[in-house]
Image (spheres, helix red, strand yellow):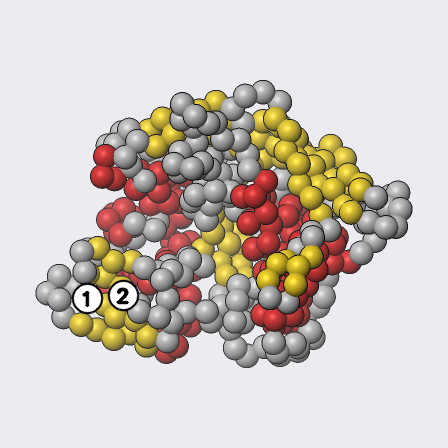
Amino acid sequence: MIYEVLKLNVENSTPLLIGGYDTQAYSEFHEEELRTQSIKGLWRWWFRAILSGRHLLQGYTDIETKVKDEVGMVLGFAGRRGSQSSRLALRFTRDKPPIYRQIKPKQSGIPPRVSLLTLGGNILNYIESIRGSLSVYLFSFQEERRTVKDENVRIAILSLVSGLLLSGIGKGSRRGLGCIDFKIVEDRVGLPESLKRWIFPDALRDILNEALPVKKQVEIKNYPPIPSVAPDFFKLWYIPFEGKEVGRVLTDLQEFTLRTKRRMVIPENGEDPFRLKLIAWILGLPRQVKGTGYISGEIQRRASPLIFSVHRDFATACLFKSSDWPDNIEWRGRDRKLNIINIKEKLDSAYKSLESMFLGYMRKKGYNVQEVRIW
């Protein structure tokens, strides 16, 4: 039997960069919509992060394997060990055709992350506006008349809602692009009542408390092996911006990740503080241009631990502290002199510097950043 357990009216608040066969939102041959495949990628990531936090607090050691198994049992898996269909399905139904826009190279007033995609003379097509309904369906042999009873299924749906609040969809999803505003239409999951009103810090706290009711049971000394929503290793900030345009807020947040822009706001002896301390790698790898910068041969990519979302009247920033970094990376300046950076030795101070510099940058930009204390 299949049941609709959650229905949301949704609308994007920031540009949605979901590409088709040619990485463009539309062409003469196709038009993209809000892909459920892209939403599922966001969904799995946040489900893993929340399950990891739960198991971390319960004292499990092989967290990665346990999380992978539990995510697969709910959202499906395929591989050498066999396969299983997802117990949950998504369906998006649009209200009307999306509004598309085109960005040309060197166009002014464009958020930095979007401008990067037009380098080399590329023209970028994206979805400016799309509205519709997003439904979550449960496949079950038991009749689910009032609420979802399976704990991990419920946590999975809470993870989806958390992901929609705290990150975006598609390209640039960690940098505030593809963010979705929603209104709850039908709820058989038992979402917090605070989500059904205006989104304030208490709503963010309530949804994560619902998803992670386990209290701290063991002393955790080391960073978790993967990003985890857990005390000491996850921080969340709520950023109201009444009177500012969404595009301005999106640009301000993205400019924190750019050395030239950051140096203008929080300089240290006239230089970028990340550059002086050689810790810009904490913003994600790779970070290199024409043979200079931070170079790691161990991994192709390590995403930033800092995730932004931007909605109609508030933004959020999340910081995940985990140990999944290469042991060592190289840094080369313009003089081509090689420096070896021991990540293990620098990781703790790098996370602390990232947090303090981000908060200092936002204060200088005139924002009232409020930490959401979940536990």
Q: Which is in the foreground here, disc 1 or disc 2?
A: 2
Q: In this picture, is 349 found above or below 175?
A: below
At x 42%, y 66%, the residue is 351
Residue 105: image location, x then y, percent: 25, 32
Horizontal placement of 181 versus 298: left or right? right
Residue 71: image location, x then y, percent: 65, 60
At x 63%, y 33%, the residue is 92
Residue 208: image location, x then y, percent: 66, 54
Give the distance between the C-alpha atoms of the residues marked 1 and 2, in whole angstroms.
8 Å
Between residue 242 and residue 308, name the one nearer to us. Answer: 308
Between residue 190 and residue 67, name the one nearer to us. Answer: 67
Q: Residues within 10 Å of mark 1 (few under 14, many from 20)?
A: some
Rendered image: mark on residue 17 = none
Q: Amino acid at mark 1?
A: Arg
Rendered image: mark on residue 295 = 2
Residue 218: image location, x then y, percent: 66, 78
Q: Residue furthest top?
A: 96
Q: Residue furthest left?
A: 335
Is mark 1 in CB contact (under 8 Å) with mark 2? yes
Q: In this picture, is 226 found above or below 364?
A: below
Q: Amino acid at mark 2?
A: Ile
**Dot 2: what SS?**
strand
Rendered image: mark on residue 332 = 1
Q: Where, by quadrant of the figure, is residue 4 drawn?
A: top right
Between residue 327 and residue 90, name the one nearer to us. Answer: 90
